[in-house]
Image: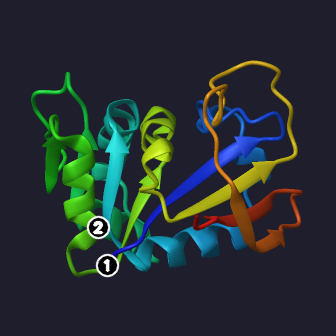
Amino acid sequence: MRKLFVTEFITLDGVAHAPNEWSFPYWVDGIGDFKLAETMASDALLLGRVTYEGFAAAWPTRTDDAGFADRFNSMPKYVVSTTLTKAEWNNTTIISSNILDEIKKLKQQSGQDIAIHGSVELVRSLMPHNLIDEYRLFVYPLVLGKGKRMFEDGNEAKLNLTESKSFSSGVVLLRYEPVKT
């Protein structure tokens, strides 16, 4: 069975919205190294519509020497949306109905891990159904005071910390797995 993990950039006050607007000043090689290894250890992306549209606009034309862009662009992508009717980024499948069952089927397939990048609303919708196997939270030393938060009232999860790592820019990686009940 494949593992479904969430990888998020969030601020100290829990904002996960538009990290492209606030995360870059804190980027260091260690974060890049982790993100590369994470991407190479997964072979599918599961995304919400908003994140998918942002990625589909940015990634198809990107290249890099490490192979991150090639991997990202070539792997299968599944976008959860009831409004998207066409997906132009290569290897993309739209999941618009029986969403929980379709995600369960993806997890049961053979292969490497499945990554959810961003996609806050998708993550929130999956949390109550115990479909997420790991949370990888990159916590940035920043308080924005406003914006879409990763967790909101009504989301509940008991988690075990499995790893913590700090980077020279003040970003801290916290890895959690849900407590098995």
Find numbered disc 1 in the image and state the secondary structure of the residue it sits on: loop
Which residue corresponds to the image point at 62% horizontal and 73% vertical from the top-left? 34
Out of 158 and 140, give the one closest to the viewer.
158
Which residue corresponds to the image point at 83% horizontal and 67% vertical from the top-left? 167
Which callout, 1 or 2, points at the residue further toward the start of the chain? 1
Residue type of the residue flagged with mark 1: Met
Q: Are marks 1 and 2 in contact (CB under 8 Å)?
A: yes
Image spot of residue 27 (x, y percent): 73, 56
Out of 38 and 103, give the one closest to the viewer.
103
- Residue receiving disc 1: 1
- Residue receiving disc 2: 107
Residue at the far top in the pictured view: 146
Image vertical order of residue 26 relative to residue 82, above or below: below
Q: Quadrant of the N terminus?
A: bottom left
Out of 18 and 26, give the one closest to the viewer.
18
Which residue corresponds to the image point at 46% horizontal and 54% vertical from the top-left? 130
Position of 144 compared to 108: left or right?
A: right
